[in-house]
C-alpha cells in the first residue's frame, strides 16, 4: 500500500464524527417533519432509541476496526480524580431530587410510565454513544498528534457541532447559539476530565443520568421541569471554572494515553 492509501487516526475520527452527526440530523428532520415531534418532547425517545442503537453499533465498528477499547478510554480508573466531577455530581443530585419529588406528586398513565422507561433506555444509549464518539474516538485519535490541547479542543467543538442539528428537530434558530455554547462548555470540561480519570465510564454514567432527568422532567409537570432546568444552569460556571483549571494543568499527552494510542491504518 502507498502513502496515499494511509488514513490517519484524526481523519478517521473526523469521518466518524461527521457520519454520527449526519445520522442524528436525519433523525431530527424525520422526527419533526413526518412525526410532528419537537426536540425536547419526551415522545422523541420513541424514535431515537432505534437511531441510537444504529449509532452505537457504528461506534463499535470504528473502535474494533481502527482503535481498541483500551485506547479510547476503557482503562483503570484514577479514583482520586473523581473529585473534579464532585461539584457537578452535587448539581445532578439536586436535579434528581427535584424530579423525583415532582414525579411523586403526579399520576402517570401506563403510556407515560412506558415513555419514562424508553427515555431511560434511550438516554443511556446517548451517554454511551456520545462519550465513546467524542471523549473516546475523537479525543484519543487527535492525541496521536501529541498536541493535547488541540485534541481537547477538537473534541469539544465536534461535540458542540453535533447539537447544531437540533435545529432540524424544531429548536428555534435563535436558541441554537445558546445551546451550542452550553454543549461546548460540557465538552470543554469533559475532555480534560477524561484524561484525568483515565476511564470513560464515569462520563458515560453522568452523561446518561444528566440527559435522562432533563428529558423526563416534563412528565413530572411544568413546575418541576422549570426547576430542573434552572438547577442545571448552576453547572455552567462549574464546567467553565473547573474546565479552565484542568486545561491549565494538562500541558502534554499523558504517558498512559500515548502508550495506548493506535497507529495509522493502511488500506
Image: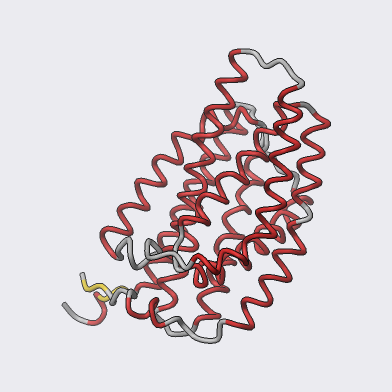
The quarter of the rendered structure image containing the C terminus is: bottom left
Q: Nearer the viewer, residue 51 or 104?
A: 104
Residue 128 appears in the picture as rendered: yes
**Residue at 61% across / 32% down in the picture?**
33
Quadrant of residue 188 in the image? bottom right
Q: Nearer the viewer, residue 206 or 175?
A: 206
For residue 140, which quarter of the picture?
bottom left
Q: How is the image coloured?
A: secondary structure
User: Residue at coordinates 81% horizontally, 29% vertically from top-left?
Assistant: 222
> Percent from the top left, x then y, of residue 183?
65, 58
| Horizontal side, residue 57 vs residue 117: left or right | left
Query: So how many labels did they put on this image?
Result: 0
Q: Is residue 248 left or right of residue 235?
A: left
Residue shown at the point (45%, 68%) measured from the top left: 198
Residue 57 x %, y % = 35, 46
Q: Is residue 115 above or below residue 170?
A: above
Is residue 202 placed above or below 256 in the rendered structure? above
Residue at the extreme left of the image, as rendered: 1
Residue at (22%, 73%) from the top-left corner? 266
Above/below status of 223 relative to 13: above
The reply, left or right, for residue 52 in relation to residue 241 is left
Q: Is residue 213 above or below residue 246?
A: above
Amino acid at each position: 500500500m502507498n502513502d496515499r492509501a494511509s488514513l490517519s487516526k484524526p481523519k478517521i475520527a473526523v469521518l466518524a464524527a461527521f457520519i454520527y452527526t449526519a445520522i442524528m440530523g436525519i433523525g431530527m428532520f424525520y422526527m419533526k417533519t413526518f412525526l410532528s415531534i419537537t426536540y425536547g418532547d419526551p415522545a422523541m425517545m420513541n424514535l431515537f432509541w432505534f437511531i441510537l442503537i444504529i449509532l452505537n453499533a457504528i461506534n463499535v465498528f470504528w473502535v474494533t476496526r481502527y482503535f481498541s477499547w483500551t485506547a479510547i478510554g476503557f482503562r483503570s480508573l484514577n479514583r482520586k480524580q473523581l473529585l473534579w466531577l464532585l461539584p457537578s455530581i452535587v448539581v445532578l443530585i439536586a436535579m434528581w431530587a427535584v424530579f423525583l419529588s415532582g414525579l411523586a406528586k403526579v399520576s402517570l398513565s401506563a403510556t407515560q410510565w412506558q415513555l419514562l422507561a424508553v427515555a431511560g433506555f434511550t438516554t443511556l444509549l446517548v451517554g454511551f454513544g456520545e462519550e465513546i464518539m467524542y471523549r473516546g474516538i475523537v479525543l484519543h485519535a487527535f492525541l496521536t498528534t501529541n498536541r493535547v490541547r488541540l485534541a481537547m479542543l477538537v473534541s469539544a467543538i465536534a461535540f458542540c457541532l453535533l447539537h447544531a442539528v437540533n435545529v432540524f428537530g424544531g429548536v428555534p434558530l435563535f436558541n441554537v447559539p445558546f445551546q451550542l455554547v452550553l454543549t461546548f462548555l460540557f465538552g470543554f470540561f469533559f475532555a480534560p476530565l477524561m484524561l484525568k480519570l483515565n476511564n470513560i465510564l464515569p462520563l458515560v454514567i453522568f452523561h446518561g443520568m444528566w440527559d435522562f432527568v432533563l428529558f423526563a422532567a416534563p412528565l413530572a409537570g411544568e413546575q418541576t421541569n422549570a426547576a430542573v432546568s434552572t438547577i442545571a444552569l448552576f453547572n455552567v460556571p462549574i464546567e467553565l471554572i473547573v474546565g479552565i483549571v484542568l486545561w491549565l494543568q494538562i500541558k502534554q499527552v499523558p504517558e498512559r494515553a500515548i502508550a495506548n494510542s493506535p497507529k495509522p491504518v493502511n488500506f
